Amino acid sequence: MKTGRHLLYLALETPREGEAAHTHIHEIVKGLRSLGWQVSLLAADRGGASSGASYFKRLLDYLRVQWGIVRRLRRADAVYMRSHFAALPASLIAWAAGIPVFQEINGRPDDIFVTYPWLGRLGALIHWTYRIQMRLASHVFVVTEGLRRWAANESQHDRISIVTNAANTNLFTPEGPRPSEQDPYVVFVGSLTGWHGIGTMIRAARLPTWPKGVKLIIIGDGVEREQLQNLPPSETISWLGRLPQAEAANYVRGSIAALSITEDTTDHLTTGVAPLKFFEAMASGVPVIVSDIAFQADLVRTNDAGWVIPMADAEALASVVAEIASRPDLARHRGRNGVAYIRQHGSWANRAEMIDAIIGPIIDGSAETAGRHA
């Protein structure tokens, strides 16, 4: 028997602390619970390359988690999914049972092929699974306007809303502890994926135009870790691996700038990007250096919150870091502009309220329809 607004949250992309998916999932769950929702999180344990599990074991894990959805479906009011091509069975089962399904799209399926090029052979099938899930969804949430247009074209409906990433404004603030690091540094925090420009950062830090005495600190882990593991000892580049979120926040706060470098290696980012690290850096009061890709670049320019550089341009990155190091007053000014934007528009509480305002009436309407037909 149902006990109220009970939401099943499905995440086949394993949420690991220190990665963006972990933060996004847990912040939305926490925000919805604070608004009175009962949320059951069902997440994979072995998803992603960083798990080290075989593809067969990952598939079994995906099926195990979705079986959990089936077992709990009778007591649920809705299913909320972080979109994943392998989630089609749960989506179909919930839809057939008349349970509203909500899809959250954080990127096009082409993102998968950057990390796993061999999956390109299954590209048509993977695109089809996304398309079917979006068409069955009661509502779709996306993070950029470009993704909204793409989802509308794929799904052939307009039940789509933009709910971008955000920042934990209690953790990521200009005030608070900083690392004991004495040298000035710029910082990157995020997954080491094929589109995060790790190579561009490394090349920039080795250029003569990179300012002397300024470090590049990279925090995170992923499939591109070999680029950092194979580096010769350097006084300029430090890789700290994955850190707890609170410790990473200290490093962001203490930096002279934070990087949101993104590279469109396979023409898969034409819908724009809204990275978590981007919001967290602005909330911390530091200027951001971003690649010239829709949404993040537009927001930086509109709010004068940092610097925009051409994609995959190591020389431009080194030059901007040199400008920041030589113009600290300008850097602090742009950092303050970022804080002002986040405090007004970019908290996770705001994002949860946006989702609640959309899914609540849909669930209530579905319940009323079911009652009339009982």
Image: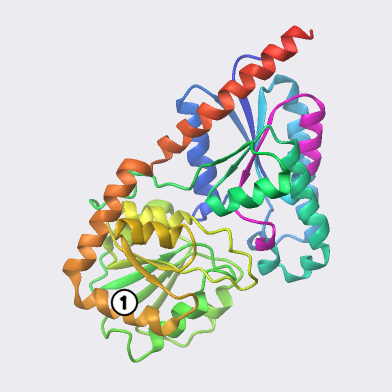
How far across and down, in percent of the image, does residue 253 sit?
29, 58
Going 63% across and 65% down the picture, which residue do you hit?
268
Q: Is residue 291 magenta?
A: no
> Looking at the picture, does residue 333 appear above or below residue 89?
below
183 or 263, which is in the foreground? 263
Q: Could you tell me the amino acid type at mark 1? A: Val
Q: Which residues are magenta?
A: 88-111
> Looking at the picture, does residue 253 appear above or below residue 351?
below
- What SS does tag 1 mark? helix
Q: Is residue 117 left or right of residue 359?
A: right
Q: Is residue 183 visible?
A: no
The N terminus lies in quadrant: top right
Q: Is residue 95 magenta?
A: yes
4 or 143, which is in the foreground? 143
Label 1 Cα crowd, 10 Å radius (few <14 / some 14-19 / many 20+): many
Q: Residue furthest left?
A: 329
Q: Which residue is mark 1?
A: 321
